[in-house]
C-alpha cells in the first residue's frame, strides 16, 4: 500500500450558469462569504471561493464558449464539476496516478488559482470523478 498523498479536501467545485446568483444563494441560505475571487483566463473560467472550515466551495462559471466548463454545462447542466485534493507535492501525486496506469489531463503540474500548483486527473480512470491535485 502507498503512503497517503492526499492531505485535505481543498475544494469542491460546482459549475454554475450565473456566478452572482450562486454566490447570493450561498450567502442568503448559509451565510457563506466569498474568500477569494479570480478570473483564470487560461482555463476560461471565473471562480468564487467560499470558505468552509479549512476547505472551499468553489463556484465556477465559464468566461467563453470554448471553455471546458462551458462544454460541461452544455452537456450535463449545472452541478458537481470536480474535487480538489490538497497534496504536499503535486508532481509526486501526479506521478503516482500515472504509475497506477491512470489517465491524466495535465501531463505536468501547472499554475492554478490563488498561486497554487495544480494538475487534473481524467475522470475516466478515477471512477467518474474529475480530480484536481492542489499544492499550496
Ligand atoms: Co478546482
Image: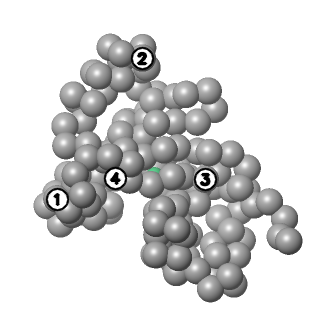
Q: Which mark is residue 40?
A: 4
Q: Residue at x 48, y 62 (%)?
A: 129
Give the position of the N terminus as an image quadrant. Answer: bottom right
Residue 117 lies in quadrant? bottom right
Q: Which residue is mark 3?
A: 85
Tell me which label, 4 or 3, sits earlier in the chain.
4
**Closer to viewer: mark 1 or mark 4:** 1
Residue sitting at 52 percent across and 60 percent down?
Answer: 132
The tag earlier along the polypeptide, 3 or 1, is 1
Q: Which residue is mark 2?
A: 30
Report if the CB atoms under discs 4 and 3 are less than 8 Å apart: no
First in sequence, mark 2 or 3: give its number.
2
Q: Secondary structure at mark 3?
A: strand
C-beta proximity under 8 Å, tags 2 and 4: no
- Looking at the picture, does residue 52 appear above or below residue 135? above
Q: Residues within 10 Å of mark 2 (few under 14, many from 20)?
A: few
Q: Secondary structure at mark 1?
A: helix
* 127 left or right, relative to 33: right
Q: Secondary structure at mark 4?
A: strand
Q: Is residue 91 left or right of residue 20?
A: right
**Residue 49 visible in the current orientation:** yes
Q: Tell whether label 1 touches label 3 (CB within 8 Å).
A: no
Position of residue 24 in the picture relative to residue 5 (left or right):
left
Q: Which mark is residue 74?
A: 1
User: Disc 2 vs disc 1: Cβ atoms closer than 8 Å?
Assistant: no
Q: Earlier in the sequence, mark 2 or mark 4?
A: 2
Amino acid at each position: 500500500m502507498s503512503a497517503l498523498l492526499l492531505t485535505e479536501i481543498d475544494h469542491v467545485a460546482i459549475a454554475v450558469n450565473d456566478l452572482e446568483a450562486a454566490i447570493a444563494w450561498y450567502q442568503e441560505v448559509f451565510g457563506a462569504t466569498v474568500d477569494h475571487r479570480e478570473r483564470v483566463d487560461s482555463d476560461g473560467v471565473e471562480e468564487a471561493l467560499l470558505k468552509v472550515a479549512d476547505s472551499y466551495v468553489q463556484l465556477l462559471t465559464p468566461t467563453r464558449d470554448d471553455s471546458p466548463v462551458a462544454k460541461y454545462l452544455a452537456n450535463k447542466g449545472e452541478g458537481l464539476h470536480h474535487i480538489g485534493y490538497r497534496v504536499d507535492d503535486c508532481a509526486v501525486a501526479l506521478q503516482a496516478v500515472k504509475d497506477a496506469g491512470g489517465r491524466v489531463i495535465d501531463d505536468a503540474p501547472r499554475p492554478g488559482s490563488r498561486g497554487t500548483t495544480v494538475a487534473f486527473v481524467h475522470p475516466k480512470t478515477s471512477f467518474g470523478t474529475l480530480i484536481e491535485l492542489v499544492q499550496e
